[in-house]
Amino acid sequence: MTQATRKAGRGRALARAAVLTAVVATSTLTGAQAASAGGNGCAWIGYDGDRIKTQHRTGCVSGYYHQDVWSNGRRESTGTYWYNGGIINRYWWTIPDGEGACTEIWYHKPEGGYQSVGLPCEQN
C-alpha cells in the first residue's frame, strides 16, 4: 500500500465519520423524530424495529458490487455479489434508539477499481 493510498483511506474514513456525525447532529438539533429511512443513489438505509435494514435499489448498471455498513465502531461488508436490477434487501445488527448507521454500495468497475454509487446515513 502506498503512502497516497493510506492517506486516501484515512480521508475517506474521516469523511464517513463526518457524514454520520452530521446526521446525528441534525436530527438532535432539529428535534426530529427517529428517522425511518434515508436514500442516496442506489443505496437506502432504514430500520426494522431496531435492526438496520439496507437496500440496493434500482437505477444501477448490472455488474459486481459490494456493500459496507457501519455504526458506532462496528463495520460489516457483504463481499462481492452480482446485481442485475430490482431491489436487494439485507438485514444487519440491532442498534439502540438515537444511534446512527451508514451504508455504502461500491460498483466494481470492469476496468478495475471501485465507484461509490450511494452513501446514505440514518439515525434510529
Image (cartoon, helix red, strand yellow):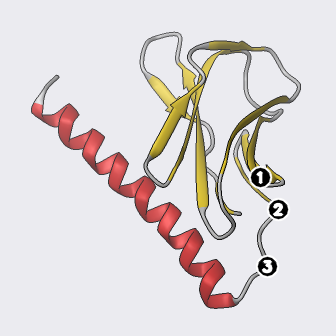
Find out whether the residues at labels 2 and 1 contact each other: C-beta distance under 8 Å. yes
In the foreground, 24 or 50: 50
Q: CA distance from mark 2 to mark 1?
A: 5 Å
Q: Earlier in the sequence, mark 1 or mark 3?
A: 3
Residue topped by disc 2: 36
In the foreground, 41 or 39: 39
Q: Check disc 2: other Cα within 10 Å, few if <14, some if 14-19, many if 20+.
A: few
Disc 1 secondary structure class: strand
Amino acid of disc 1: Gly
Q: Residue at x 47, y 25 (%)?
A: 114
- As drawn, which residue projects farthest toward the left? 3
Disc 2 secondary structure class: loop
Query: Which quadrant, please, contains the N terminus?
Result: top left
Q: CA distance from mark 3 to mark 2?
A: 9 Å
What label does residue 46 carry, if any? 1
In which quarter of the view is residue 95 placed?
A: bottom right
Q: Residue at x 75, y 47 (%)?
A: 51
Give above or below for 106 relative to 22.
above
Q: Residue at x 77, y 52 (%)?
A: 46
In which quarter of the view is residue 122 placed?
A: bottom right
Amino acid of disc 3: Gln
Residue topped by disc 3: 33
